[in-house]
């Protein structure tokens, strides 16, 4: 297990809109390999958590499939896989609901240059909620 500096950039376009909501943050975390799967763990701040309920995030990356799990102030498990639509239960402070996740692109270069890129859509009730991009880069500290 190694300590890593994690830089995360997200872009979200709400369904039917052309406005991009961008967020970028840097945090520290841990990265390790288990049975051919890269596991990345870190704590999120900002809107997802508060001091009493920090959000712990774990990414399990294997090839073109990424499982994103959050626990704490917000709980969810999203499976993002290129060319596949998965359903997930999503728990937020505003209520619980089921969403669909369709993986448009998964570029896993963590082993070679410490980068992961995801592009996916979220849908609910047969309607597009958002288009999303997630870029992660890690460096050992």
Image (cartoon, rainbow, N blue to C red):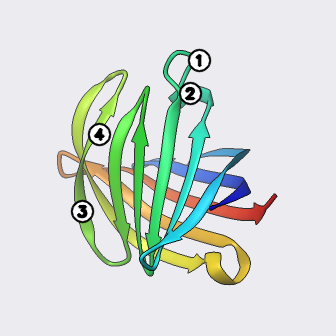
Question: Disc 1 and disc 2: Cα gap in Å?
Answer: 11 Å
Q: Residues within 10 Å of mark 3 (few under 14, many from 20)?
A: some
- Residue annotated with mark 3: 86
Dot 4 or dot 1: first in sequence order is 1
Looking at the figure, which quarter contains the N terminus? bottom right
Q: Is 9 placed above or below 137 here? A: above
Between residue 23 and residue 138, name the one nearer to us.
Answer: 138
Q: Residue at x 81, y 58 (%)?
A: 141
Alpha-carbon neighbours of circle 4 within 10 Å: few (<14), some, or many (≥20)?
some
User: Of circles 3 and 1, which is in front?
Assistant: 1
Mark 2 burial class by Cα count in 10 Å: few <14, some 14-19, many 20+: few
Separation of marks 2 and 4 at Cα, in angstroms? 16 Å
The residue pinned by badge 2 equals 47
- The disc, 3 or 2, on the residue closer to the chain's N-terminal end is 2
Q: Nearer the viewer, residue 119 or 73?
A: 73
Q: Is mark 2 on a helix, strand or loop?
A: helix
Using the image, determine if residue 106 lies above or below residue 59. Answer: below
Q: What's the CA distance linking mark 4 and mark 1?
A: 21 Å
Question: Marks 3 and 4, how far apart in space?
Answer: 12 Å
CB-based contact (under 8 Å), mark 3 and mark 1: no
Q: Is mark 3 on a helix, strand or loop?
A: strand
Of labels 3 and 1, earlier in sequence is 1
């Amino acid at each position: 297990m190694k300590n890593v500096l994690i830089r995360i950039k997200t872009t979200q376009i709400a369904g039917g809109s052309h406005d991009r909501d961008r967020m970028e943050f840097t945090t520290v975390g841990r990265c390790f390999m288990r049975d051919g799967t890269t596991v990345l763990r870190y704590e999120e701040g900002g809107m997802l958590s508060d001091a009493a309920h920090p959000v712990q995030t774990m990414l399990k990356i294997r090839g073109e499939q990424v499982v994103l799990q959050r626990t704490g102030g917000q709980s969810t498990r999203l499976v993002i896989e290129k060319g596949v639509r998965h359903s997930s239960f999503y728990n937020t402070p505003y209520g619980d609901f089921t969403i669909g996740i369709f993986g448009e692109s998964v570029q896993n270069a963590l082993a070679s240059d410490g980068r992961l890129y995801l592009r996916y859509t979220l849908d609910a009730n047969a309607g597009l909620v958002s288009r999303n991009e997630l870029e992660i880069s890690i460096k050992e500290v």
